[in-house]
Image (tube, rainbow, N blue to C red):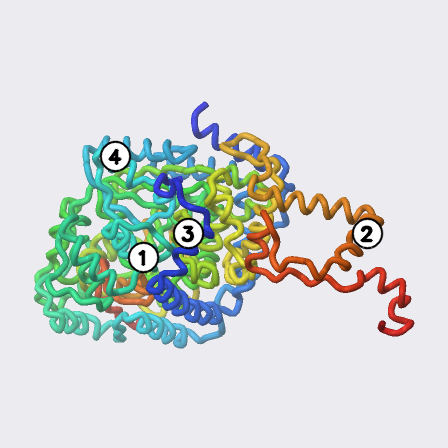
Amino acid sequence: MSGTYLGMPAFPEAAREAVGNATLRGNLRHATHTIRAKRAKAVTEVSDWAELREAGKRIKDHTLRHLDRYLVQLEESVTAAGGVVHWAADADEANDIVTQLVKMTGESEVVKVKSMATQEIGLNEALEAEGIHAYETDLAELIVQLGKDRPSHILVPAIHRNRGEIRDIFAREMSEWGRPAPEGLTDTPAELAEAARLHLREKFLRAKVGISGANFMVAETGTLVVVESEGNGRMCLTLPETLISVVGIEKIVPAWQDLEVFLQTLPRSSTAERMNPYTSTWTGTTDEDGPQNFHLVLLDNGRTDTLADEVGRQALRCIRCSACLNVCPVYERAGGHAYGSVYPGPIGAILSPQLRGTGSEIDASLPYASSLCGACYEVCPVAIDIPEVLVHLRERIVQGGEVTSRGNKVVLRPAKGHAAERAAMRAARWAFLHPGVLRTGQRAASRTRRFHPRTLPGPGRAWSGTRELPPVPAEPFRDWWQRTRGGKDGDR
Amino acid sequence: MNSRERILGRVRRALADAPGDEAPLSRDYLREHGQRTVAQTVDLLAENLADYRALVHRTDSDGLAGLIVGLLEKRGSASVLVPPGLDEGWLAATGVPRVTDRAESTPAELDRVDSVVTACAVAIAETGTLVLDGSPDQGRRRITLVPDHHICVVRVPGQVVSSVPQGLERLDPARPLTWISGPSATSDIELDRVEGVHGPRTLEVILVGED
């Protein structure tokens, strides 16, 4: 994944800093609470939500189960419709393909539709290194790009910024990139949107190359679908001569009819609308309408590794709606940056460690960035059991075991940080298997209870730092049971 | 080994121990939500379009040309883009100069046009959505994108369906489709909806009754 995040501290450290930022917490609280109530209302409008959710889950599971077949079918149908299909095993390969395609057009700038996949592979940085300027055109992505910032939300990458901060970024930075912000710009959202419209218009009108992702790809017809609000997507998808779409291989649905499920569940889950303002679908190229050159780059970059994990593979059902972020108590307080990935929040906590592996400190800590409250699972429109995957990944980190990395089976060693926990568990297991030992230990503990510390020493300190140690009773339970015959001889 | 073979190989190995084919998908969700008469479905379309800040007008075929000229005059439009196959009669009453979209027109030229008038392929009542499919009376995708004022004519009830599933059934995936639900908007500032970013900021929808 993107080099932007290399060297990120583990989640607890990053979160501690974020939680201390009162502005950030205020911004996040306001935004997530606004959308939460609206989503609930949009979902209630649809009486068959449970059936739609189940169908979405089943369609995605079926697709993943036969992903090889559908990828080949998609390639055939896109090619037949006039598109060119490329395959990229990892981020570097995808970046190289896109860079070469842009260079072949002779252009040195591209306009971009908001795309998680291109964020994930760090495409903008890769293009910049080759002298190609990539302009983000989604309003929130523009705010992030102008502010030299990082995205903190899947749907609204600038959610951590309030209107006043956005105004300041526009007023300060727009002139560096093109048309300056209007004089006397205020912080009303309508004026900020107008400033973005004016700033980006000249870029849209002269653009020769557009780069996008896609929300869905239909194997049967070769159709790609982009769901958006502002019209920047339509601009990038229709005005340029060349369109390059970088899409994760899990974005396939088998049939045109399958869209009837997701085009109902996605808008209501993400922006809480009955339908988002604009949805574009295109199948290869169309004579005299839109780009005459269309390239589709199919991206693996850890997806097949995720697919190999029978519990974790359900994360690939994700349609990037971000409902799980908006309801998460941890996300609401820690913010998106603490997750150290373009995929923050609950879905990020299970996706990033699977796409990237658990080798880094941040990735090994992400499965713990949750209270396991389950709100994310409740709202997920494709019923990803995020808590189940979190627990599964915690187990893998503590115990190690076989995983797939870049297509190869490797055996992970148990994580170092959990040595004390494992030692304690081994000791407990041994004691529980030897009743005599357990009894002696319990009696010793009861007799010495006056001298017990309130916190644990050594590696146990971190654990007891936030918890009360359970008090040891004056008499072990089994002794009490034997003495009183289970209470029949009176309580004492 | 090329990347295509590498990725397909990884997929097949990843799925080697996956269980066999599952039960067929049961589509037991609804084909439409609630029961309505045809007239109620058209009313719902109008209501949902208006809810997302489209301006909705209703007329019959006799009143259509007069309504369109009125809308263009009220807007003060100095030019209007016209797709090649638009019904001649629709603009018969207006003297506003017409601009025909040609393949060689540049986006900058389109940007100087004030309004665009098109038909549509399908309208979806439950979501307040218009779908354009690039037919001759709708034109290339860009003509309904660059001008700031879009007038879209929907023949009711013939072009109206209740739901998204019914809409998809009527559409041809081979054509480039644009689904429009209200004017351009964004939720990017504090997750609150604001109308008016890059697409047409004014969307006027004319529901014209069929004779």
Residue A391 located left or right of residue A15: right
Q: Chain of mark 4?
A: A
Q: Chain of mark 1?
A: A
Residue at the disc numbered 3: A14
> Of the residues shown, which amino acid type is indicated by label 1?
Ala
View extreme (top): residue:
B1
- Is there any visible trace of residue A96 in the rendered image? yes
> Of the residues shown, which amino acid type is indicated by label 2?
Thr
- Is there any visible trace of residue B165 in the rendered image? no
Residue A283's place in the image compared with B55, above or below, is above
Residue at image point 16% right, 62% down? B115
Alpha-carbon neighbours of circle 2 within 10 Å: few (<14), some, or many (≥20)? few
Asked whether the residues under marks 4 and 2 belong to the same chain, the reply is yes
Measured Cα–Cα span from mark 2 to mark 3: 44 Å
> Of the residues shown, which amino acid type is indicated by label 4?
Ala
Residue at the disc numbered 1: A158
Foreground residue among A42 and B32: A42
Q: Which one is earlier in the sequence, the residue at label 2 or at label 3?
A: 3
Q: Which one is earlier in the sequence, the residue at label 3 or at label 4?
A: 3
Residue at image point 32% right, 45% down? A212
Residue A401's place in the image compared with A223, above or below, is above
Alpha-carbon neighbours of circle 1 within 10 Å: few (<14), some, or many (≥20)? many
Residue at the disc numbered 2: A440
Q: Chain of mark 3?
A: A
Foreground residue among B164 and A447: A447
Measured Cα–Cα span from mark 2 to mark 1: 59 Å
Q: Which one is earlier in the sequence, the residue at label 1 or at label 3?
A: 3
| Disc 1 to disc 3: CB gap under 8 Å | no
Tag on residue A129? 4
